[in-house]
Image: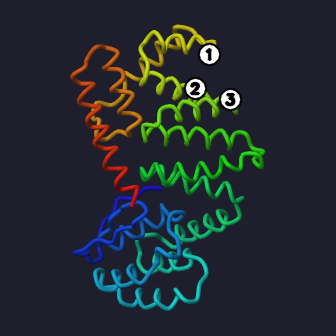
Amino acid sequence: MSKIIICREKTAETPFVFLNTKVEIYTYEELCFYIYNNTVLISKSTLSEKLFSWIRDELGMAQLAERLFALSNKVSFAQDMLVEILNAGDYYTPEEIKEYVEAWQKYKKLPRLKRYKLKADAYMLARRFIRAATIYDDIIDNEKEIQDKVFLANVYHNRGVAAANNMDTDDARKFFLRAYELNGNPESLKSYFFVVSAEEDITTLRNEVHKMGLDDEYFENVMGEIGDSKDDVREMTIFAMLQRAVYNKMNKDMTDYDKRMDIILAELKDEFRDQAI
């Protein structure tokens, strides 16, 4: 779900930072929005005295902070305290909070590996690709106990996206192909070709397409999709930036290729430094 955040409460002078995602929040409304949409990434250890003190001192919500301090020693699950935070204001309606509680109850009943995947997917959305990759690897290590091939294929596909965004192109190719082998998802195969195009010339890419039993029309469609990548590279994922850079390389626009690769490498350095913390 999405909301326009209209802040009615006090705005903090110093933000609270969720360390695992590096998201900064300044208001009670932003805190509620983050909780509602990132519950799987919030552990009980995150709900610490540091957060409670921030709610008291920066947001001026002393009563809520006091309740959270008391609850922290009584409840076993972080979500009990998260619901307390959501109920402290009117950013979400009672019905929305009820839906949130029901969704969390369903989540807790999911098999362990499906919970892992949801957590990894959430890290992907937060662009924490190294953290996501580690969790996907944990799932893949348990591949023998997974009967659902579609689920496993989706894990491999997302692992490929994480690898591509970390510029681990060899691994990305391997993961995308494995995903395609498992359930024949055309998006996995297309992603494989995108990564091939990042490393090889047009002739090699065309040969790879033919090797998979596909024709020149498919090859042209892949090239067209790479060319249709958005121009504003700073709003794109690294994987999408790479697609656009490759298109320019193949069309002999080396100036634009070099510029985009410089942006990609700079972002990779920043993200690796952040994710290593």
Q: Which mark is residue 181?
A: 3
Which residue is under mark 2?
Answer: 189
Quarter of the image where one finds residue 63? bottom left
| Sooner in the amino-acid sequence: mark 1 or mark 2 | 2
Do callouts 1 and 2 mark residues in contact (Cβ within 8 Å)? yes
- Amino acid at the residue labelled 3: Glu
Which residue is under mark 1?
Answer: 212
Q: Position of residue 43 (x, y in %)?
A: 52, 71
Residue nearest the viewer, comparing 134 with 179: 134
Q: Position of residue 123 (x, y in %)?
A: 48, 54
Around disc 2, counting alpha carbons within 10 Å, would you say few (fewer than 14), some (14 to 19), or many (20 or more)?
Answer: many
Whether residue 270 is situated above or below residue 154 in the rendered picture: below
Q: Position of residue 130 (x, y in %)?
A: 47, 50
- Amino acid at the residue labelled 2: Leu
Disc 3/disc 2 C-alpha distance (Å): 9 Å
Quarter of the image where one finds residue 250? top left
